Image (tube, rainbow, N blue to C red):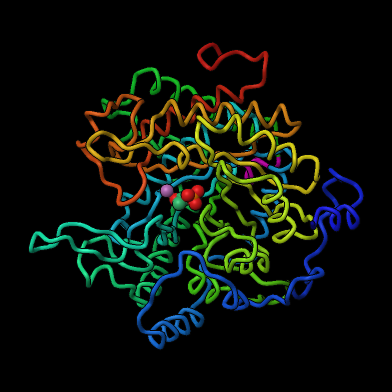
Amino acid sequence: MPQSVRSARRPEPRAPSSRRAPPATTPRHPEGQEPWSPTSWRGRPLAQEVAYDDAAALERAVEQLRALPPLVTSWEVERLRQHIAEAQRGERFVLQGGDCAEMLTECRPEIIANKLKILLQMSLVLVQGSLKPIVRIGRMAGQYAKPRSKPLETRPGPDGQPLTLPSYFGDLVNRAEFSAEARRADPQLLLAGYQHAALTLNFIRSLSEGGFADLHHPEQWDLEFLDRADLSEETQADYRLASTRLVEALRFMEAIGETSVAELTRIEFFTSHEGLNLHYESAQTRNVPRRPGWYDLTTHMPWIGERTRQLDGAHVEFFRGVQNPVGVKIGPSTAPDDVLRLLERLNPEGEEGKIILIARMGVKRVREALPTLAEAVGREGTPVLWMCDPMHGNTVSTSSGLKTRDFDDILGEIEHSFDIHEAAGGHLGGVHFELTGEDVTECIGGGLSENDLDRNYATECDPRLNYRQALEMAFCVADRMRPRGSLPRRLL
Ligand code: PEP
Ligand code: CO
């Protein structure tokens, strides 16, 4: 296995951070690996392949996409890589969150702003628990493609007879409505997805440049939220205290002449999505002037999903060649050797800031599944950032058939993950949530019971934490991260 090759090439496990090798002009091709190009994935088995019925129309759409400007820049991608490298060393903590599936129809100012607000609020809470800078990454501006466990779906048709149609694969591919026309894979949606991602990003960028994201005025992120009656008084009071303390700390640093305060007060926000549709990803993957290597410029941080991370599959082939930091979802049946081989394939030089392992085990299985993986990766010594996605292993169905998740299971998986990584000699470096800034009723807990779910169950895909649940979750995670021996949040 690659393990012996690895150890021969890199004899010092856990070597210091300066080891990061500069990227080559073209991606490296370790023994046994074919040369890489943005289209070399086309020769590999493609899991979750979309059945486009008009190959010429698909090629035309991809060509158009190729000619359009990038959505993000290589220097932003490199900056995120540096942050991820620091998080790998325990110097930062990552908060990643957003919808399970973004919808084109939800590309609306209040929805985007509310999602940004809840992520900013959560980061403000987390910074005071972790005492580390928080890297904020949205599942935003491109989270339009969804893997499905079943390619087809059967429902009663207009005549009452069972009708079988392709499943809904996200707005980048087809539409959720249950009709033959809506469920047809439409290559034009690749362009519509790109355009809506651009509109979303444009708005996020404007908001984060302006007063909205000025850390001196965190009240801009919240008033409307915090005054809503269904946020518990305790959470409101805790949040107000947290933001007041932040403003005081900034003023103090300015008063003592801290020069880097301007840097500190600028909000950075990165985007991510599952890199599922390789037509979309590869069309926007390019070389940039004066920087070696290839960048997937649809997003800062693409990730490979649990269903598409086959070692010899198209997705691993594609993402081994890009400079972006790349996430890999890791489910409970993953063997340690699977992870080591993936790391070898995706990051053969053991570069820093490159790989984020996003474990999604479920609260019931995390204690049996995660320790051996964490230990094996730790022994191997290759730098990774371990994150916890406590959503995808904790999905259950109610008696009426709604998919939901319980706040306590979500928190439980995170708490176990902190313990497991500590016991393995590493650390949990980030959390990954499906959440929204809206008052939806999709997850149980934090004030909602199963009977409340019908009130505003709005997701087309997986259940999301609403703004109240998300903020309370941030407080719970912050409490868990507070350095031992420090006062609990209420007494600070
Ligand atoms: C997701 O993140 O929405 C998802 C489908 O996750 P996973 O690949 O872990 O199942
Ligand atoms: Co999901």
Q: Residue at x 37, y 55 (%)?
A: 102
Q: State whether the magenta stretch is mostly helix, strand or loop.
A: helix
Q: How many marks?
A: 0
In the rendered image, the residue lying farthest to the left is 159
Q: Position of residue 129 (x, y in %)?
A: 59, 26
Q: Is residue 124 visible?
A: yes
Q: Residue at x 77, y 75 (%)?
A: 25
Q: Position of residue 261 (x, y in %)?
A: 65, 40
Q: Residue at x 40, y 50 (%)?
A: 100
Establish if 186 lies above or below 355: below
The image quarter in which residue 198 lies: bottom left
| Magenta range | 259-265
In the rendered image, the residue lying farthest to the top is 491
Q: Seen in the image, is 20 located left or right of residue 285? A: right
Residue situated in front as seen by the camera: 429 or 91: 429
Q: Is residue 123 magenta?
A: no
Residue situated in front as seen by the camera: 358 or 250: 358
Q: Residue at x 74, y 43 (%)?
A: 377
Q: Position of residue 466 (x, y in %)?
A: 35, 37
Q: Is residue 271 visible?
A: no
Q: Seen in the image, is 466 located left or right of residue 320? A: left
In the rendered image, the residue lying farthest to the bottom is 56
Q: Seen in the image, is 463 located left or right of residue 300? A: left
Q: Is residue 262 magenta?
A: yes
The image quarter in which residue 409 lies: top left
Q: Position of residue 212 (x, y in %)?
A: 43, 46
Q: In the rendered view of the protein, which quadrant contains the C terminus?
A: top right
The image quarter in which residue 54 lies: bottom left
Q: In the rendered view of the protein, which quadrant contains the N terminus?
A: bottom right
